């Protein structure tokens, strides 16, 4: 079974990439930090539910 991020995580990924492309470094950094925080939380929760032999 593979980890699949939520729709919110994918939306943040798109937004931080758009900010980067637009040259808005401040917005990019803010969105990237928010993305990483949520992605890490979700992936950690996913891993905690998996048997140790899969991690």
Image (cartoon, rainbow, N blue to C red):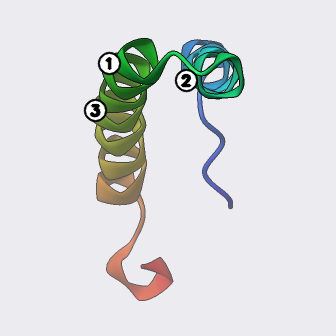
Marker disc for residue 37: 3
Q: Nearer the viewer, mark 1 or mark 3?
A: 1
Residue at mark 1: 30
* 46 shown above or below 55: above
Q: Which quadrant does the C terminus fall into?
A: bottom left
Which residue is at 42% across, 62% downward? Answer: 50
Relative image position of residue 37 (x, y in whole percent): 28, 32
Residue 11, located in which quarter of the rendered image?
top right
Q: Report the Cα–Cα distance between label 1 and label 3.
A: 11 Å
Q: Do callouts 1 and 3 mark residues in contact (Cβ within 8 Å)?
A: no
Q: Do callouts 2 and 3 mark residues in contact (Cβ within 8 Å)?
A: no
Q: Which quadrant does the N terminus fall into?
A: bottom right
**SS at mark 3 in the image:** helix
Mark with earlier residue (2, 3): 2
**SS at mark 2 in the image:** helix
Mark with earlier residue (1, 2): 2
Q: Residues within 10 Å of mark 1 (few under 14, many from 20)?
A: few
* 26 shown above or below 21: above
Marker disc for residue 9: 2
Relative image position of residue 6 (x, y in whole percent): 60, 23
């Amino acid at each position: 079974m593979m980890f699949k991020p939520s729709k919110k995580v994918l939306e943040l990924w798109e937004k931080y990439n758009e900010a980067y492309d637009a040259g808005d470094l401040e917005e990019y950094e803010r969105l990237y930090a928010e993305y990483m925080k949520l992605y890490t939380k979700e992936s950690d929760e996913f891993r905690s539910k998996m048997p140790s032999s899969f991690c």
